[in-house]
Image (tube, grey):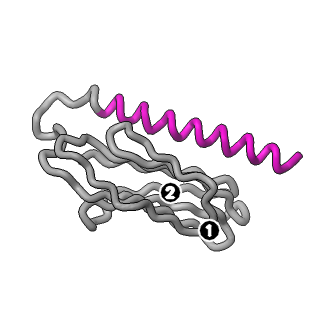
Amino acid sequence: MKRMKMSQLLKGTFVVLLTTMFIGFATSCSNDDDDNNGPAKNSHKVVFKAIASSGSNIDVAVYGIDGNPTTASSLSGTTWTSPEVTSEAGAYNANVAVNAIGADNSSTLKVQIWVDGELKKEGTSSGQYLAASASYVF
């Protein structure tokens, strides 16, 4: 019974995170009125990372560029790193959302977006059921 509730909770959290990513992308585009904050003129090398506290278990990660998500499921362990993704010239943003189950209520989860070898954005979560996300505009 407890396992079923956690499964339902993780599925629900996953749906909420995925929806948040798409809403964030849509609203960021609608507020762009000037050319200085437009799409990137060059391609970029992007890596997404997640780091959970000891005893935690990373379960699912959704990452992508410009609304083209990739889902990595059935993950385990306290760290996860995506393969390097090359954005196209003209790409607008990068997003990542990760779910994990912590060892206890003081557990933490950190997600990061690295662009061209430089940390650009970070998001965190704490508690037993962890869901962290980050979004970066090029």
Residue 109: mark: none
Which residue is pictured at 40% across the width and 61% down the height?
83
Which residue is pictured at 62% across the width and 41% down the height?
13
Which residue is pictured at 59% across the width and 52% down the height?
73
Most extreme residue toward the bottom is: 54
Quarter of the rendering containing residue 78: bottom right
In the image, taking residue 32 as reference, residue 66 lies left or right, namely right
Range shown magenta: 1-28
Residue 8, image x, y percentages: 74, 40
**Along the polypeptide, which appears first: circle 2 or circle 1?**
1
Q: Foreground: 116 or 101?
A: 116
Which residue is pictured at 26% across the width and 49% down the height?
87
Residue matched to label 1: 77
Name the residue type under label 1.
Answer: Gly
Residue 82 lies in the magenta stretch: no
Name the residue type under label 2.
Answer: Thr
Magenta highlight: main SS: helix
- Assign a secondary structure to mark 2: strand
User: Mark 2 or mark 1: which is in front?
Assistant: 1
Q: Residues within 10 Å of mark 2 (few under 14, many from 20)?
A: some
Residue matched to label 2: 124
